[in-house]
Amino acid sequence: MTIKKETITIFIIFVLCSLMGFSTCLAAPLGNIWQNFLGIKSNSFGMFGNLLCFLPYFLFGYLAGNILEKLGYKKTIIIAFLLGFLGITIQYLSCKNFFLKFYFSEKLPLSIFIYFLGAFISGTSNCFINTLYNPLINHLLGEGNKANSLNILVCGVNSFSGSIAFFLLGFFRYKNILNLSSISKMLLLVVFIFLITMIIAFFSPIKKIEKSNSNESSLNLKKILSIRHFYLGMIAIFLYMGIEIGLNNYTRIALNSMNFYQISSFLSGIFIIFMSIGRLIGFFVGQKVSSQILSLFSSFICIFLCFLGIFVYKFYNNLTISVFQYKIPLFAIFFVCCGFFISIFSSSLFNLSLKGLKSSAEKMSGLFMTMLFGGGLIPIFQSFIFDNFGVIATYFISIFSFLYLFLYSKFYEKL
């Protein structure tokens, strides 16, 4: 089976992951907008919508893998589109003035709970998307560097779409129109994109993947979780997701606390753009270099950059560089540059964990999805650390996570 014969399937994968990237990257900033709108100081409240966006991974990740295994890829793709359409529509409705008239308490209008519901349903859609695209690509192209490179490219498109969300937020802030009304227009556009691509997917000839007859297909949950390189890889994915969401968002929040409001969202967008560029480069490098080497090198560089960022923040807090007419704190540059290297972890860790287990890929992919909950749980924990101990302490959580990824990659062959 070649990419040429499966062009439509690959296209749908790209569209799904683009929509997933946009809605995921919008979750935390939209929560902060609600936080500011309601006059709530706690960063934990601002990250609660992000937590709900990732909670479905923990609740439904394994279920999504079983559904994928039973229903096949096309029906699972349609389910993902339907959930995404519903989730974004509900978030759009939460921004309308009608629901702001009804209050559960003095500071909590009905709209905030509608937004939370929409974030949860969108997260469920993202869970299904994440569950299906990696094993589908591996089935289309087989295991190895070729599948890994395409997985990295798909992740790059996902990151680029996420950066668009941050750039739009930055533009709205620059124009002083960052409010629920402007956000609702952006969400309405995403609703129409979901609807159109769902119709395309429904009429698309997505080829059914034949089941393998090997003994691996009978692996039960207990047997799967006893495979050392797999369950340690699950922990790696949990920590990686916390890094990707937390490192970017708390750099943005740190900049806001230093009154760099106009550039904070733009730098978050640059972080995601750097992830896109890193994944584009990884698409070519991944065809020649193994997932283990990519993960090992990237985790080492990220540890180095984080220590540099902390050092500059601690001792040269006021040091800035000028880009066009804006001044950017130097410490933020080091953390933003981590985006280049964080970019390859998703596909690389997936391939390392599933090496030699292709026939059980759907079920194991579902287990993997439970670990993406790290993208919601770790940032909410970091918000508590940030509020009580400051931003430097939150960065050490990222360093610990990078260290685990480094050790997992370093000793992978011995697992």
Image (cartoon, grey):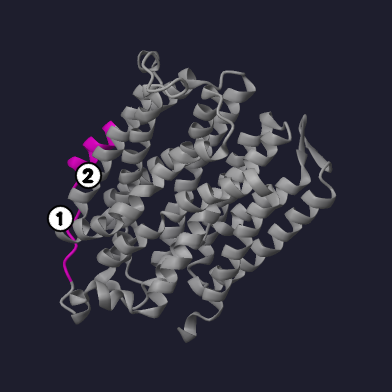
Residue labelled with disc 1? 71
Rounded to the nearest angstrom, the CA distance separating label 2 from label 1 is 10 Å
Q: Position of residue 272 (x, y in %)?
A: 56, 46
- Circle 2 residue: 79
Closer-to-camera residue (42/256) = 42
User: 212 above or below 81?
Assistant: below
Q: Marks 1 and 2: in contact by CB < 8 Å?
A: yes
Q: Nearer the viewer, residue 314 or 20?
A: 314
| Residue range corresponding to the magenta coloring | 195-211
Residue 297 percent across, percent down from the top left: 61, 69
Disc 1 is placed on an element classified as helix
Q: Is residue 202 magenta?
A: yes
> Which residue sits at x=49%, y=80%?
412
Residue type at mark 1 is Leu
Q: Residues within 10 Å of mark 2 (few under 14, many from 20)?
A: some
207 within the magenta span: yes
In the image, is 188 to the left or to the right of 48? left
Residue that sits furthest to the front in the current view:
105
Q: Secondary structure at mark 2?
A: helix
Q: Residues within 10 Å of mark 1 (few under 14, many from 20)?
A: few
Q: Quadrant of residue 358?
A: bottom left
Tell me which amino acid carries mark 2.
Ile
Picture coordinates of residue 96, whole percent (x, y): 38, 17
Q: Residue at x 60, y 50 (%)?
A: 247
Which quadrant does the N terminus fall into? bottom left
- In the picture, the quarter occupied by the C terminus is bottom left
